[in-house]
Amino acid sequence: MKKYINTDKLYPIAGIALALVLWQIIVQVRNVPGYILPSPTRIASALVRDFELIRYHSARTLYASFVGFGFSIVLAFILAIIMDSFEIIKKALYPLLVISQTVPIIAIAPLLIIWFGFGTLPKIIIVVIVCFFPIVISLVHGMESIDEDYLRLFKTMKATKLQVFYHLKLPFALVHFFSGLKIAATYMIMSAVIGEWLGGDRGIGVYMLRAKNAYALDRVFASILIIVIMSILIIYAIEILGNRVLHWQTERDED
């Protein structure tokens, strides 16, 4: 059966292209200075000109982001399993997790830099703090949403807690896990950049800050573009991975 191009995907591309064309026209017609609003062509030129420097700083940001993201996943799984196994721990920790997300990360970051220095560690901790919450909450919710009939069935089959977790709770929780993972991924790069703004000598956030101080807004917009592209690619990769891991769920939805 022939596959046709999904025209729905063309609309956002056309919308972005139209916005860029209008942006370019307005800047040229109004003769807007580059230190106020650079044109898309000027931003593209800055991206090409500083590509090697941006690539170097982006690599440092990605390193802190992925390390922190990995720790977030591991800690989220451990805590979700503990909270699911012990109701009293879940009741005690759940409000604390919610409260932890009400504290502005920009207020915590300077403290982490004072305690751990200007290296990569504070950025990793910031990424963990930001990304940990949506992942653990998604896992806990996934384990809670299992139908009681399934649990009773496993109980009648005299399954152990490990068997119930591996064959029942984990597959159900993975559906929610990948949803939480995509939410966390949207904040992954951003949280590392915030840490770099407040202290550091390397990273795309440092590059952006230096460009801002020099009123080189074309380089600022170029770094923003790189951050957006990296975030979109990470979310897209997670979506592809989720579709492969949860192929049984996709097939059931199609049926």
Image: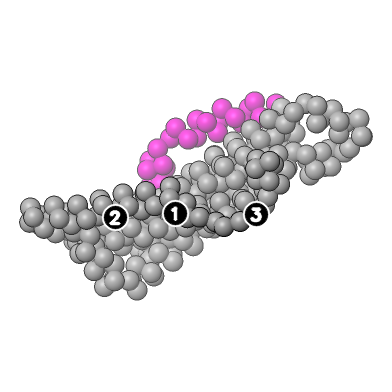
Q: Are marks 2 and 1 in contact (CB under 8 Å)?
A: no
Residue identifier under label 3: 244
Is residue 217 visible to the viewer in this orientation of the structure?
no
Nearer-the-camera pick, 107 or 236: 236
Residue at the spot 37% in from the left edge and 48% down from the top edge: 11
Residue name at image x 55 percent, y 56 percent: 3
Q: Which mark is residue 17?
A: 2
**Eye-nearest disc, 1 or 3:** 3
Residue 232, numbered label: 1
> Which quadrant does the C terminus fall into?
top right
Q: Distance of mark 1 from mark 3, alpha carbons? A: 19 Å
Secondary structure, mark 2, is helix
Residue 230 located within the stretch drawn in magenta: no
Horizontal side, residue 100 vs residue 244: left or right: left
- Chain-order first, disc 2 or disc 1: 2
- The image shows residue 77, relative to residue 92, as above or below, that is below
- Between residues 208 and 26, which one lies in front from this camera angle? 26
* Kind of residue at badge 3: Arg
Amino acid type of the residue that numbered disc 2 sits on in the rendered structure: Ala
Query: Which amino acid type is shown beneath numbered disc 1?
Result: Ile
Q: Which residues are magenta?
A: 88-112
Frontmost residue, 128 versus 233: 233
Quadrant of the image containing the N terminus: bottom right
From where the camera sits, is residue 237 visible? yes
- Along the horizontal axis of the image, is 174 left or right of 45? right
For mark 1, does the 10 Å Cα neighbourhood hold few (<14), some (14 to 19), or many (20 or more) residues? some
